[in-house]
Image (tube, grey):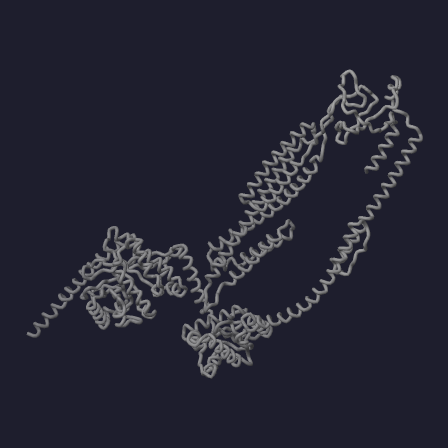
Amino acid sequence: MSVAALAAAANFIVERGVSFVADITMVTPPASLPAVDKATPLTGTPATTAPPAKTLSADELTRALERFDEAVYSALQSDSIEVQARYRQSIIELDRAAESFMIQTEAFGQHTYMSVPAALRQHKGDAARWIDLSQDRRRLLREYSETLEHMDGRVNASLDGAFKIWGRVVARQSLVQLNTSLSGLRDSFAGAVRTWSTKPEIFQSLTTAEAAFAKSLLDNARSLRRAESDEWFSAMERDFARLVEVRTALVETHQQLTSIGNGFVTQTIRLLARMPKSVAPAEPATGVTNEPHEARPQQADGGAPPIGEHSLVTKPLASPSLSETNAAAEPAEPTSSNRTLVAWISVIVLAVLLWISIATVRSVVIPVRRLIAASEKIAAGEPDTRVARGGIKELDSLAVAFNNMAERLSRAQAVALDAHHHLEEKVAERTRQLQELAEVDPLTGLPNRRHLFTLLNASIDRASRDGRRVGVLFLDVDNFKNINDSIGHSFGDRVLRAIAQRLQAAAQPAGFAARLGGDEFTIIYEGIGGPDDVHAAGEQIIRAFQSPLDIDGRDLIVGVSVGASIYPEHEQNAEALLIAADTALFHTKSLGRGRVSVFTPDLLKGASNQFRIEQDLRRAIERDEFELFFQPEVGIDDLQTQLVEALLRWRTPDGRYVPPGEFLSVAEQSGLIIEISDWVLRTAVRAASQWHHGSWPQARVAVNVSPRQLLDYRFVDRVRELLAEYDLPARCIEIELTESVLQTGPATIEQLHRLRALGLAIALDDFGTGYSSLSSLERLPLTRVKLDRSLIESIDTNTRSRSIVRAIVEMCNGLGLQVTAEGLERAEQFERLLGCKHLSLQGYLLARPAPMEQVFTAMASAAQRAQELVLLSKTNAVASVIKQLPVAAGRASANK
């Protein structure tokens, strides 16, 4: 380009003409310059010396803009205080640099940069909007993730609360399907976050997963509402609707982020492109010499030439006349020879320039193309590719380095290929071993749980095609835990191996055995008949274990319990068949071990009902649906209430009270009784404290305690803490328990002694039934005995019951124990107990259980009712005497 410009300038000079010829000579100036008179000009000497020229620079603004962009990128990634502070500081620096730059442009008279402040303001506004959108995206991602976690937690809570039968979870298929679709939605979201993009297929995966979850939720709506409640299902619907809203907003936000981000980067490039590299100001006016034909040489930067030992000056060839001077102002006519010379020079320069350009392009483009082609071949798997040398020196060196790299890559690929072959062989061997481990139980050599499902599904498929049945026997070893605890786990493992061999031999040739885990085994029979055949097969398995096992020279007899199910009568798939057989096994153990039970729908119904009650109990604890009612116990001596018994009631959301007999056994089995009993104890202590510090200072409350609470070593400390918290004397609380506590061992009796040492009264409930014995009166630190209602039921109709009750009352009086007769419902029962001393009465005849706010009314009503019954019994006695008098008088007169 420079050569072309030079040729054009030469052509211009020729066209315009040349008005002077400069003779450049080296002149040595004098040692000192004489004073110059204003009227006498000096030839070749400038009248004034111009200062060095300054340039308009945008370096400071460019650096400030770069720092601002870096701060913006940091603020996009994090919203920490440090990053935000750096972002605000970069704005201040950018404003300061822009202000300084505009001051320079005004000083230089450059008006082409007046739009820079407006562009910077727009740039900062786009940056702020970009950062806000980035924060919105983080917020939406967090909200989407939290909503997913809420839904997952709700589903997992339902699965964790699923009914368990001997370690196996029985959950509805609808809940399992919903959990599976929710896991898919969570995985799709995680994938979309990892590979976030505006490509439609990224969002298509998330949308598809949401559609699958919505379908699962809709298909199983009825089952989920029935199993988990309408409130649970509505919460899932609300959370899923929020997921869809957040995902839509997330997509829109990210698209806006992409659009604004592209615009921001483009605007940065445009701003940097508009910045001046180096702009000189307009040359100020300077003084001129009086000699019109002398010219001032200029420095490269436009300033005046320096005066030194050697200065460049122009010397006129002759002193022209006035007419010549006027003629010089006219452009000279170019001669033909000059034009021809300049034209040839221009042609030669352009030809040289063209040749240089072509040679340069070829020396760069051809080697680069060879390098690109070789790189593509290597990338395609051709490591033997080499690049021909040539081109400029740098590209030739690059070709040599590329060939060396290709050589090393070829050798490395050969080594890697060899190692890959060895690795494939090892992987194949390990895969075979893992496949065997994945299908076979390592202890017994039987198919494991995973392989069992594969085999059972295959058996079901064959039976479905052939119209046959498949029998499933689910069994476990009776009291196997005692073997591990007494002899050791290693011996127990040998026992399991012997059991597996016995089962495999008993199952052949009609079936096969598998181990589920622990001491649980399964036997599958294909082509089985009806329930009788399955029951007979189970009996055969039980008989097979009547002969002892030989374990290390020791004869060991073990028993098994069996539960059975049949395809297709009972269930249609492998998992459901195993659950049905497990349910039958649970029923077998409830009846007694060493027998066979075949599944019936009623068994699963009972298990489902128990599972439903357990789930409802868990929700009842969360919703605080329990209430305490109090029933007075009236003393027969003074007909006054001496004590009230706290009775638990469960009020369902529909207002119905569930009797304790329907849920306490389920609470015991599930372990919820601990939490429920703790609530009962706290509520009873709080009620007793209110009465004691209020209108009933002698208040006493009896609280029923579960044996499982007494097994907790922290129970006594818990009672002590509650008494201290509510400032209640220990004598105000009486602990009621049943004789089943004797089965829990001496540790429980020690707990009772500690409670008695605190000052609490202890009552033995349901005395006269179950495990009742006179030894319990001696072993337990009792203060009261409560006669079971079964003894009071027939006291007015059975003379033996009346005699037993009176004997127990007199015995307890002799032992210093208080006695309560519970279950009093008829006036005749009351009348038979009037002769007893130091006896308390409790039953619907005197008062029904009442809530806390109605206790005093119930106590007054009980006292009044007792007085009425006393008067009624006396009236009945007098009437009976009067009724017998005439009969006696008649007999006397007749005798006379």
**Residue 221 place in picture, x, y as percent:** 51, 57
Residue 721 at x, y percent in the picture: 32, 56
Query: Visible in this render: residue 532?
Result: no
Q: Is residue 600 left or right of residue 385?
A: left
As drawn, which residue projects farthest toward the front? 31
Q: Is residue 388 left or right of residue 164?
A: right
Q: Residue at x 29, y 65 (%)?
A: 752
- Nearer to me, 484 or 788: 484
**Is residue 705 or residue 282 the one in the foreground?**
282
Q: Residue furthest left?
A: 896
Location of the C terminus (image quadrant): bottom left
**Residue 490 appears left or right of 247:** left
Q: Residue furthest right?
A: 337
Decide if residue 26 is in sight here.
yes
Give the camera-side residue of 765 and 814: 814
- Please report the residue visible at 85 percent of the width from the left and 27 percent of the height from the top: 22
- Percent of width and height locating residue 106: 67, 28
Q: Residue at x 49, y 56 (%)?
A: 153
User: From the viewer's perspective, is 5 left or right of 499?
Assistant: right
Instruction: Residue 850: name its quadrant.
Output: bottom left
The tally of labels here is 0
Position of residue 522 relative to residue 338, above or below, is below
Q: Where residue 89 appears, x then y in whole percent?
A: 57, 38
| Quadrant position of the N terminus in the picture | top right
Q: Residue at x 15, y 66 (%)?
A: 880
